[in-house]
Image: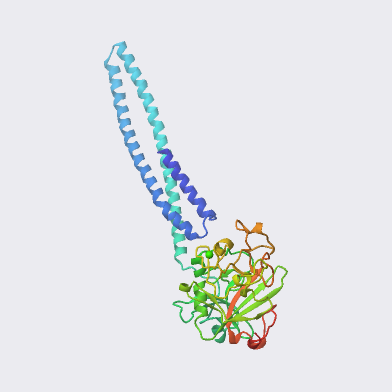
Amino acid sequence: MASSLSSAVAGVLLLLSLSSAGKYCPTTCGVADYLLNYMPGVNQDIDDMLYELERITNLTEGAVEKVDYMKDSAASAQKSSQSDAYYKRSSSMLDDVLRFEKTITAQEQQIFELQSQITDNERRMAELKQLSIQLQQKCSEPCKDTVEIQPTTGTDCQDIANKGATSSGLYYVKPAKATEQFLVYCEIDSFGRGFTVIQRRRDGSVDFHKDWIQYKEGFGYLSPDDTTEFWLGNEKLHLLTTQSTIPLVLRIELVDWEGNKKHADYAMFRVGPEVDMYRLTYAYYFGGDAGDAFDGYDFGDDPSDKFFTSHNGMQFSTHDKDNDKYDGNCALQDGSGWWMNRCHAAHLNGKYYQGGRYTEKDAGEFGFDNGIIWVTWHNRWYSLKETTMKIIPINRITAGGGQQAGVKQFGGLGDS
Ligand SMILES: [Ca+2]
C-alpha cells in the first residue's frame, strides 16, 4: 500500500512539473490531454488507499477491543488467583498486552501519517483539476492563425493581381476545376504581374526527399514574406496549369553561392493529371540567361546523354513510384521527386548542399549527382543555393516592360 501511495505521489509531482515546465509538450492542449488521461488512474489509486485505510482502522478497532478484554481478564485472573504459577503466567500475559498496545499505538501513528498524506494528495488533485479546467478553457478557444492571409481570391495570382491586389503574400486561389480553394504565395510586382509560386528552395530547411503522396499533396511551408521552402503539390500544379486557354510561362529563377542570379522561362507549361503521372510538357524554351537545361545536356559520357537527360514530356517520379526512362530508379538514387528521364540535366528538388560544391562521396550510397542542378549554368557537382519556380499567363510575362530585381531582362514573345 505504501508503494502505491508513493507512486501516486510521484505521479502527481510528475504532473505538476510537466504542467509548469511545459517544455515536453508543444502546446498547452497537450498538457491538458495528458492530465485528463492521467487523472482517472490517480483517482483510482486514492480510492484504493482509502479502502485500505478503512480496513486497517477496522482491524485496529478490533485489536483495541481485544486488548481491553485481555487486560480485564488478566487483572481479574491476578485478583482471583493466589497461586504463584498462575500469577507469573498472568503477568507475562500482561507484558504481551503491553507490547500489543505499543504496536497498536505505532500503527495508529502510521495511519495518522497516511491520512495526512492522503489529505495532501487530495489537495494537489484539486489543484490539478483546477489547472486542467483552466487549460481546457484555453484549448476550447479556436486556434487563431497568426499568419496574415490576404482577402482577395481568384483562380490564380494573376487573376488576384487583376482584381487590384498589389502586395506579395499569401492568397487563396481556386482554379476552375478545383473542388476547394488552397493557399499559395503570390509574387505581385509594381507592373501588376501576379506570379503563382510553385516551388521554393532557399536554405535547405525542408527535406525534399518525399514520397508520391507528399509530392502530390505538397509539403514544406508557405510564408507571407517568402522566407520558407515548399513544393506546392502536383495536384495543385495540374489544376493551376490546365484551367485556362491562355498559355502559361514557367519561370525558373536560380541563385548560386556567389549571389549570381539567372533565370529560364518555358512557354505553355502544363502538368498532366495523376493518371498520366503528372507529366511535364511545354512548347518551347522562352528565354533566359540560365540556359535550357530542360532540353537535356551533352555530358560527354555518351552521345545519347542529351536525349536521355531532357525533361519535356517526362512523367513525375518519386522513390516509391518509378516512371522514369532508366532501368534503375532515378528518384530513389537521387532522393527527390522530379520529372526524371535517365535521369536529369535539371534537378531543382535535389538534395541541398551548403556551399554548393559536392562530390560523389557526399552523394550517399548511390554516389550520383543528386544536388540542386541546372547544368547549363553550373555543372552537375554544383548544387544551387536558391530556386524559385513560378507561373504566369504568357501575355503578362513582359507586361510593363519591367523585370524582377536582379533578374536580367530578356526579349518578349517574338524573340524566342
Ligand atoms: Ca526506372
Q: How far from the left and from the top, in percent, is residue 157?
A: 55, 81
Q: Nearer the viewer, residue 113 or 38?
A: 38
Q: Residue at coordinates 52% horizontally, 51% vertically from top-left?
A: 17
Above or below for 322 versus 87:
below
Q: Is residue 412 at least partly visible in the picture?
A: yes
How many numbered marks appear? 0
Quarter containing the C terminus: bottom right
Quarter containing the N terminus: top left
When asked about the image quadrant of residue 294, the answer is bottom right
Q: Residue furthest left?
A: 80
Q: Residue furthest right?
A: 258
Q: Nearer the viewer, residue 121 or 237?
A: 237
When asked about the image quadrant of residue 81, the answer is top left
Query: Is 69 displayed left or right of 27 in the figure?
Result: left
- What colour scheme was applied to this rendering of the protein? rainbow
Above or below for 47 versus 143:
above
Q: Residue at coordinates 56% horizontally, 86% vertically from top-left?
A: 162
Q: How far from the left and from the top, in percent, is residue 245?
A: 51, 86
Q: How far from the left and from the top, in percent, is residue 18?
A: 51, 52
Q: How far from the left and from the top, in percent, is residue 51?
A: 34, 42
Query: Is 157 displayed left or right of 299 in the figure?
Result: left
Q: Nearer the viewer, residue 318 or 159?
A: 318
Q: Is residue 149 at least partly visible in the picture?
A: no
Q: Residue furthest front?
A: 303
Q: Nearer the viewer, residue 15 or 285?
A: 285
